[in-house]
Amino acid sequence: MQKVALGKTGVNVSEINLGCMLMGSALDRTTSYEMLDRFVAAGGDFLDTANCYAWWVGRGEFVGAESETLVGQWLKERKNRDRVFLATKVGARLKDVKRIRDGQGQVYWDQVRQEYEYLSAQVIRQAVEDSLRRLQTDHIDLYYAHIDDRVTAQEETLAALQRLVEEGKVRFIACSNFRTWRLERARQISAARGWASYVAIQQQYSYLRPKPGADFGIALNADDELLDYLRCNEEVTLIAYSPLLKGIYENEQKREAYYNWPLFNSCDAEVRLETLAQLAQELGVSRHQLVLAWLLHQRPRVIPIVAASSLDQYEHNLQSLQIHLTDEQLAILNSATA
């Protein structure tokens, strides 16, 4: 696995970011450990988790501390903290996870947004201490503002993150699900005050493009404006979550069942799916592998977060690293449109 630059930090990380979201909840300890072990053995070092993963799994038995706890246990047992570039997040943990479920454990999704902790200085201070304890480490390499907070002033959030950098508890900071103008405003605030600045932004990004005006709620999909911004500001790296859109590229039934499929289902998506299928067949690879390979060939640079629900799926996805796309093949994929 190759290493790529993270912005202009001077730090190189693996070209694939291993998503640890379901470890400790949907993924048991044995499978999670094996996946982490294989990732490091393959040359990977970039791990992604958050202090809210994954409270929504099951019927209320998980609170959102499970992923960090498992990763922390693995780091302690393997004694390899110095080999890992560790990212976690703050802001999307729920104040009371029990309040948004009914008696049968079903989630009141329309009430989730009001339960987020968001990004006040007090929340950040408590959250980082809790994450450090669960991760069993004295520092976090990349600390994300997980969701945008339109109530707390960005100055307060950034000042709190700056203090963590000064204390050595956080090396670099990043944001997730911020619109481009909010990212730029935050960077201007940091520059004016000499504070740490966001070196990465995490957005949903995949080969299929959402329909114009698609509303993902608190989440955001990387759009043309963000991509154009990043081409001109190489000090910020795009980290792509959900690059396979819950695994919908291979299976029409799974596509139809995907809760966000109405936001993608269009003539443009139809053309892109057909183009992807044709080239995947010519190359003898799966559509999922080709999507990941396409992301790895993009400029501005994209580091996809790759997760899996099984070891076989993990190995299948990592085979995308072996796919080299020519300029002609990239042009075919990039130009596909209705």
Image (tube, helix red, strand yellow):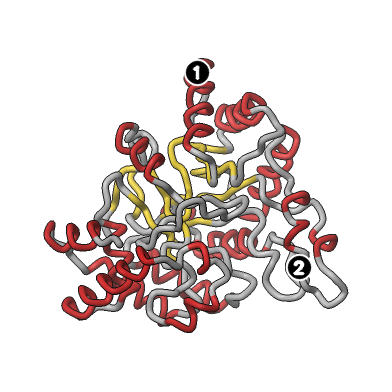
Please tell me which residue lies in front, 42 or 277. 277
Q: How many residues crowd around disc 2 within 10 Å: few (fewer than 14), some, or many (20 or more)?
A: some
Identify residue type, mark 2. Val
Identify residue type, mark 1. Gly
Look at the image and tell me in which quarter the C terminus lies: bottom left
Is residue 107 positioned above or below 104 on the image?
Answer: above
Q: CA distance from mark 2 to mark 1?
A: 42 Å
Q: Position of residue 91 (x, y in %)?
A: 66, 45
Q: How many residues crowd around disc 1 within 10 Å: few (fewer than 14), some, or many (20 or more)?
A: few
Mark 2 or mark 1, which has the lower sequence index?
Answer: 2
Look at the image and tell me in which quarter the N terminus lies: bottom left
Please tell me which residue lies in front, 161 or 260. 260
Q: Residue at x 31, y 58 (%)?
A: 295
Q: Residue at x 27, y 64 (%)?
A: 293
Is residue 317 positioned above or below 325 on the image?
Answer: below
Please tell me which residue lies in front, 315 or 285. 285
Secondary-structure class at tag 1: loop
Q: Position of residue 282 (x, y in %)?
A: 16, 78
Q: Position of residue 152 (x, y in %)?
A: 70, 31
Q: Which residue is mark 1?
A: 194
Quarter residue 108 falls in = bottom right
Is residue 285 positioned above or below 62 on the image?
Answer: below
Q: Which mark is residue 321?
A: none
Q: Which mark is residue 107?
A: 2
In the current view of this chain or complex, which residue is farthest to the right? Answer: 103
Left or right, residue 206 beside residue 213: left
Please tell me which residue lies in front, 301 or 281. 281
Secondary-structure class at tag 2: loop
Q: Residue at x 26, y 47 (%)?
A: 299
